[in-house]
Amino acid sequence: MPRGRKINSNGEKSKQLLLEKAVELFSERGYHATKISDIVKAADVTQPTFYLYFKSKESLYNDLNLQFQQGFNEIMRNENDDVEKGLEGFIEVLEQKLYLLFLYIMENPKLTKIGFFESKQSRSVKSQLTQQLMELVYRHDCDHKFQLQNIDIKIVADSLVGSFERLILTNLLEQKSKPCELARNLVHVFFLLKEPPRA
């Protein structure tokens, strides 16, 4: 934040407005087709005001990506100590985290388009999510369940992230399913399907 500006001052409002308009323009036009002059015009501020807060278009874009990542990381890091260890505890926590991630995406569709699908950093976000899902398995002491069946935990986590990404596009952003339904279905597909009883 520039020196001399207070939080909730007009300056801070200008910065927030620039970020909001940038999200809209980047998500509609893409990074390369959006110019600083477009953002400034949409935010109804001067070009010098833009440079008070951002060195360049790239630095503003990076700020938006960081904002998206922080939302994801906050959900994945937040841990409930009351949940039991083992596969059942893991499944319960996983469903809750997926629900919160879907909810976050639904509340931030334009930021998601940038941070999860279009930016260079989106690949890193997905890799980090894979890692966080693997850590969730280890935290609940259920990695041996996968090892007993000779299942690679990273492949499971990568597949889960791939399915998560696909469901965002085909169901969530199209408003065909609610976040809680998607989270429940995704967890059931990966971890709760059982073979039907033999006749």
Image: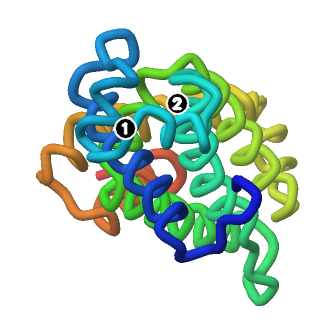
Place of residue 84 in the rendered image (x, y in percent of width and height, measured from the top left)? 77, 81
**Toward the viewer: 159 or 32?**
32
Q: Residues within 10 Å of mark 2 (few under 14, many from 20)?
A: many
**Displayed quadrant of residue 34:** top left
- Residue 160 showing in the rendered view: no
**Displayed quadrant of residue 45:** top left
Instruction: Reply above or below: 9 against 175.
Output: below
Q: Residue at x 53, y 41 (%)?
A: 64
**Toward the viewer: 27 or 38?**
38
Colouring style:
rainbow
**Toward the viewer: 80 or 63?**
63
Which quadrant of the rendered structure holds the N terminus? Answer: bottom right
Residue that extends furthest to the bottom in the rendered view of this protein: 82
| Callout 2 amino acid | Tyr
Q: How many marks?
A: 2
Residue for badge 1: 22
Q: Residues within 10 Å of mark 1 (few under 14, many from 20)?
A: many
Q: Residue at x 33, y 33 (%)?
A: 39
| Callout 1 amino acid | Ala
- Residue 21 showing in the rendered view: yes
Place of residue 91 in the rendered image (x, y in percent of width and height, measured from the top left)? 60, 64
Comes first in the chain, label 2 or label 1: 1
Say left or right for 1 vs 141. Answer: left
Question: Do the numbered discs 2 and 1 sit on residues whose CB atoms are within 8 Å?
Answer: yes
**Toward the viewer: 134 or 11?**
11
Say left or right for 95 vs 59. Answer: left
Place of residue 47 in the rendered image (x, y in percent of width and height, measured from the top left)? 43, 32
As measured in the structure, the alpha-carbon distance from the residue carrying label 2 to the one carrying label 1 is: 8 Å
Look at the numbered disc 2 and give the secondary structure of its residue.
Answer: helix
Residue for badge 2: 61
Say left or right for 72 vs 175. Answer: right
